Each structure stands twice: as structure tokens, then as C-alpha cells.
Amino acid sequence: MNFRYRLMQFMSGRYGTDDLTYGLLILGAVLSFINIIIRLRLLQLLVYAVVIYAIFRVLSRNLEARRRENRFFNEKMNFLKNKMELYRCRKNDKYHVYRKCPACKAVLRLPNRIGEHTTVCPRCNKEFKVKVRK
Ligand SMILES: [Zn+2]
């Protein structure tokens, strides 16, 4: 109980853990596991740097800066999650192919018909060729 009280006193006013901390620790574990196989001194130093940075963040008293870092990390992770979800949905869609318009970069969902076709972008009305392979 005394130790727990001391730990609580030590941690008061400090940032603690968040998603970025867990992300850094997972990254450190993954890099460490990779380093078991390929054994690079530089990679080992990188593992130390990642873990030390995670510990620094937990003990930091600059709460606003740590929150900003965490917000940035969460935005990037959400972006990645959305991209992966989109990729998974498109991969499972057997009846359509997805092509980007070369003019306006809009993504068009086209019927999955094998061969070379001409299509018109509904957004910018540009005509372009689409090749669909099996
Ligand atoms: Zn277009």
C-alpha cells in the first residue's frame, strides 16, 4: 500500500499512458523480434530509442505537447484504418472494378467486364480508357 501511494505521488502531474505509448511499445516489441532474426546493432539502438521515448512520454509533465502528439498519432491511425477498410471492401467486391480518373482523380466504380473500354467520368466529363484484366 505504501509503495502504491508513493507511485501515485510520483505520477501525479505526469502524462501517463495513451494510444501512442502503446503504439511505441508494440513497435519496439516488433522491432526487437525482427532483430532476433537479423541481428543489427543499429536496429537494437532504434529499439532502445523507441522504448526510451515511450518512457519519456509516460513521465513527461508537458501534458499539452503529449496530447498533441497523441492526437496526431490517432489521426494517422484512423486514416490508415479507413484506407485498409476501403481496400478490403473493394477487394471483396467481385462485380466492380475501381479506377481513378486521370483528370480529376475521382475514383469510379465500374462494372467488372474484361477487356478495354472507354468510360466518361461523371464528375469532370473527361473520357478515358479502362483496361480490365481477369
Ligand atoms: Zn474525372
Image (cartoon, rainbow, N blue to C red):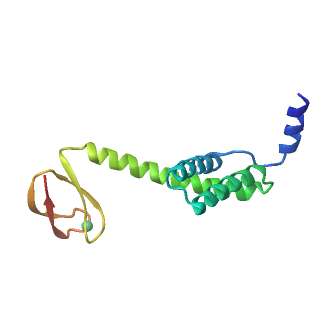
Asked whether 119 or 14 is in front, the reply is 14
Residue at 26%, 42% (x, y): give it.
Answer: 92
Q: Position of residue 9 (x, y in %)?
A: 89, 41
Quadrant, the N terminus:
top right
Q: Quadrant of residue 12?
A: top right
Q: Residue at x 27, y 46 (%)?
A: 91
Could you tell me residue 59's position as x and y percent?
78, 50
Q: Is residue 104 positioned above or below 64 on the image?
A: below
In the displayed structure, 128 sits above or below 6; it is: below
Ligand 1: which quarter?
A: bottom left
Residue drawn 54% across and 53% down?
35
Q: Is residue 129 left or right of residue 40?
A: left
Which of the pair 4/118 is nearer the observer? 4
Give coordinates of residue 62: x percent, y percent.
Answer: 78, 57
Above or below: residue 2 compared with residue 109: above
Q: Is residue 80 left or right of residue 1?
A: left
Q: Residue at x 40, y 52 (%)?
A: 83
| Nearer to the camera, 46 or 71 | 46
Tell me if 69 is positioned left or right of 124 in this view.
right
Q: x, y percentage for residue 26?
A: 58, 46
